[in-house]
Image (cartoon, helix red, strand yellow):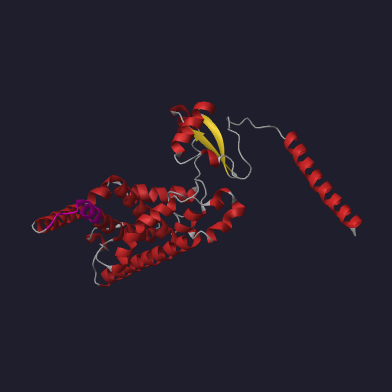
Amino acid sequence: MAFSFDLLFFSVSSVVFLLALLKWFYAASKPQKKLPPSPPKLPIIGNIHQLGLFPHRSLQSLSRKYGPLMLLHFGSKPVLVASSSDAASQIMKTHDLVFSNRPKSSVINRLFYGSRDVAFTPYGEYWRQAKSICVLHLLSNKRVQSYQHVREEETSLMIEKISQMCSSSPVNLTEIFVTLTNDIICRVALGRKYSEEEKGRKIMENLRVFVELMGVFDVGDYIPWLAWVNRFNGLDLKVEKFVKLTDEFLDGVIEEHINKRKGEAENDHSVEARCLDFVDILIEVNKESTIGFALGRDDMKAIILVNWISLHLFNYIAL
């Protein structure tokens, strides 16, 4: 019995040793790529431990030692760090097509319907068409100017509200400004205000958490075999909760717009007679087939969501 065990142990050890040796010979025989300078890394986690509590300061310190262009490894993911204007210009301008793809993130992929938005979708034909929709139809100068009356109406309502509140108690201007921008953004993007509805208020309250999820550290993105950790730290459940809440809300918004357009058609009212919001524009663009392909429901929701989130993100940064 002991002889059999020793033989089995020797056989397994020999196989492991031979595989390691073959891997070493294979790596040695391959032509070595000229990679940027890189600090020593640890097994499994790579250089993650060197980021510290203030990653921007840690990266600055590392760049002083390893140069303006250095290679780090976050788990199994190689990361190129540029810390000079010349290096950034080479990446963003000279070799922009090489670096044009966005990094893949499982959380972002779930939040934005398989990354069908314009910000995180891979570079290609769909990205070019989605970008064209945003630049030419949603965020053009003419379109932005068409919402001037919305901004004026909501600003007047805010001033009236402040004048009524000032006579009785102190006024929290931060809260009022947040409500103002939320109402303007909702009218522009979704067609009407939702701050006075229970479901709309719930969406607004959870919007900050949604933005936080966009930047959350997902260990599975860097160490794939540890992706199961998200089931125990609550990340998977949290993402699913917000995906469901947002999806139901956007479905209701799109259905509301489709039904409104049907009612206007039955009553011989022109859609162009009123100011079009983002959802109207996407439905119109899809109906006229001006982009060469049909937008699916999830595509529309992803594009609406990323523009809506972006506007709110600028709002939070400003405040």
Query: On the picture, is 175 further left or further right than 249?
Result: left
**Which residue is rendered at x = 34% and y = 54% of the image?**
308
Q: Position of residue 307 (x, y in %)?
A: 36, 52
Q: Is residue 170 magenta?
A: yes
Q: Is residue 100 above or below residue 235?
A: above
**Which residue is rendered at x = 50% and y = 29% of the image?**
63
Q: Position of residue 294 (x, y in %)?
A: 44, 59
* Highlighted magenta segment, given as a residue range: 169-179
Secondary structure character of the magenta stretch overall: helix
Q: Is residue 167 above or below residue 77?
A: below
Q: Is residue 209 magenta?
A: no
Q: Quadrant of the N terminus?
A: bottom right
276 and 93: which is toward the camera: 93
Q: Position of residue 5 (x, y in %)?
A: 87, 56
Q: Is residue 97 above or below residue 192?
A: above
**In the current view of this chain or complex, which residue is farthest to the front?**
2
Q: Is residue 115 visible?
A: no
Q: Position of residue 278 (x, y in %)?
A: 32, 57
